[in-house]
Image (tube, grey):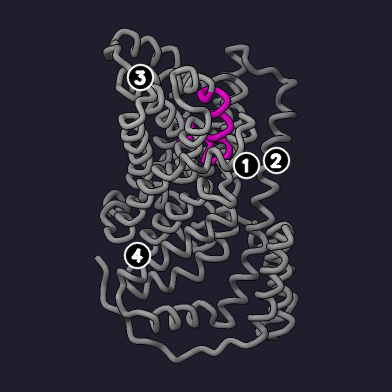
Amino acid sequence: MLQQYLMQQEEVILGWGFYLPLIVMVLLILMAVRIWVVIGVGSFAMLIISEVLPPTLLGEALFDGIDSFALIAVPLFILTGDILVRTGLSGKLLDVAEATMGARRSGLGTSTVLGCGFFACISGSDAADAAAIGRITIDRLVDKGYPKPYACALVAAGACTGILIPPSISYIIIGLVLGISASTLFLAAAIPGVMILVSVMVANALVNRVRGYENSTAGFDLQYWLKTVYAGRFALLIPFIILGGIYSGIFTPTESAAVAALITIIIGFLQGTLKLSDLPKILETSAKVSGVIVPIIAMSLPLAQTLASLQVPQAFVNFMTSLTSNPYLIIIIMIAILMIAGCVMETTPNIVILAPLLLPLAQEIGMHEVHFCIFMVTALGIGFITPPLGLNLFVVSGVTQTPIIAISRYVVPFVLTMLVIVLLLGYFDVFSMWLVN
C-alpha cells in the first residue's frame, strides 16, 4: 500500500553542468544519433563541465557496466528465439495456442495473442515476437475476415508481452541498472505479464463482437488438442525448462538461457530442421541485436553515477513533490512520463535513463523497488504500439508492407486496456508482490 511521504530533504540546485549536456543530448536524439552515442556524449560532457567526478571514470565505468554474469542471458535468450523460428518450433507453439483457444468466438485472434505469450516465454524480445508471429498469423487472420491493418495491430499488441512476460530482457536490464535480482523480477512479473496478455485478448474479443470480424462455431476438440500438444511437445519443453528452472531455483536466468539455447539447437539437429551451416547466420543475427543493447548498458553506468553525484534524482523528487502531495497523482504523472518516453524512445535507453531518476520518487511514496520495476516496464511496454516510435508497429508494417498510419488507427482499444492494467499495477502492489512475498 502507498505510504505517507518522507520528510523533504534540502533543495538541490542544478547548474549548467547538467542543463547544457541535457540540451545537447536532446538535440542529438532529434538528429537521430544512435542512443548509446548520445548517452556517452552526455555523460562525458557532464563530467567535464561539472567536475563532480574525474573524467577517467568514463573509461572504467564502461567496462564495469557490461562486466556482469546476468547480462550474458540477453544474447542467449535472443539466440534461443532465433533458433526457435529457424527450426519451425514457433509454428508448433501457435498450433497449440489455436487448438486451445480456436473454438471461441474470436478464436484465431485470441490464439494469436496466446501464441505471442508462448513465444514471449522464450525470446524475451517484443520485436522478435512481432516478427515471428506476424509472418505466420497475419495472412491467416485476414483470411478469417480481419482487416489487414487490424490484424497487424493485434499482433503488435500481443507481441508487447515479449518484454512483460518472463524471461524478459527488459527485466534483466532494469535489474542490472538498479541492482535487483533478475530471478526476483521474473517471479514478480509473472502475474502482471498474464494480466497484460488477458487484456489484449479481452480487447480483441470486444472489438470482434462489435465489428463481427470472426465468428468461430466449432466446439473444443479434446482429441485434436491432445494431438497438437503432443506434436508441439518439444516446443513446449523450452519455456518449461526456462521458467521451471528459474522459479524452482535450479538455474539462474543466465544458466536457463544457456540450457534453453543448447536444447533448442539439439532438437533442431535431431528433427532435421537445423543444419550446421545455419548456425553462423543465426549467431550473426543474434549478435546484431545484442550489439544494439550492450553499448547502451555500457554507457548507462557513468551517466547514472554522474547524475547521482549531481543529485539530479533528489532534485527531481523535490520538484515533483512540490507540484503535488498526493501519491496517487504522482503515479499518474509517472505513467504519463513513461508513456511519453515509450512513444519516442526504445525500452532499453528509457530504462537506463529513467529508472535511476524515478526510483527515488517511487520510494518516496512508499513503492517497493520490485513493485516499481514491474510498474515501469509495463508502462513502457505500451510505447511499443504507440506512435511515433511504436517499434512493434514498424516491425509488423515491414513484415506486411502495411502503412503505419493504417495500423495505428486500430491500436487504440489495446492501448486503453493495457493502460487499465498499468493503473492497477501502480495503485495495488499485490499483483507484483504476491508471488515474491
**In what element is the residue under mark 3?**
loop
Which of these two is toward me, 143 or 429? 143
Earlier along the polypeptide chain: callout 2 or callout 1? Answer: 1
Query: Which residue is labeled 1 in the image?
Result: 75
Give the quarter of the image for residue 343: bottom right
Query: Which residue is labeled 3 in the image?
Result: 102
Q: Residue at x 51, y 23 (%)?
A: 137
CA neighbours of label 4 inside 10 A, class few (<14), some (14 to 19), many (20+): some
**In what element is the residue under mark 1?**
helix
Q: What percent of the width, then of the height, locates residue 5?
A: 30, 79
Q: Residue at x 68, y 49 (%)?
A: 292
Query: Which residue is labeled 2 in the image?
Result: 287
Which of these two is toward me, 136 or 312? 136
Earlier along the polypeptide chain: callout 3 or callout 2? Answer: 3
Figure quadrant of the C terminus: bottom left
57 w.r.t. 96: above or below:
below
**In what element is the residue under mark 2?**
helix
> In this rendering, which labeled residue sits more in front, label 3 or label 1?
3
> What type of secondary structure mainly makes up the magenta span?
helix
Mark 1: amino acid: Pro
Q: What percent of the width, then of the height, locates residue 85?
A: 59, 25
125 part of magenta stretch: yes
- Label 3 and label 2: CA atoms lie apart by 36 Å
**In what element is the residue under mark 4?**
loop
Q: Is residue 207 left or right of residue 22?
A: left
Mark 4: amino acid: His
Query: Which residue is labeled 4 in the image?
Result: 368
Counting every numbered tag in the picture gives: 4
Per the rendered image, the range of residues in magenta is: 119-138
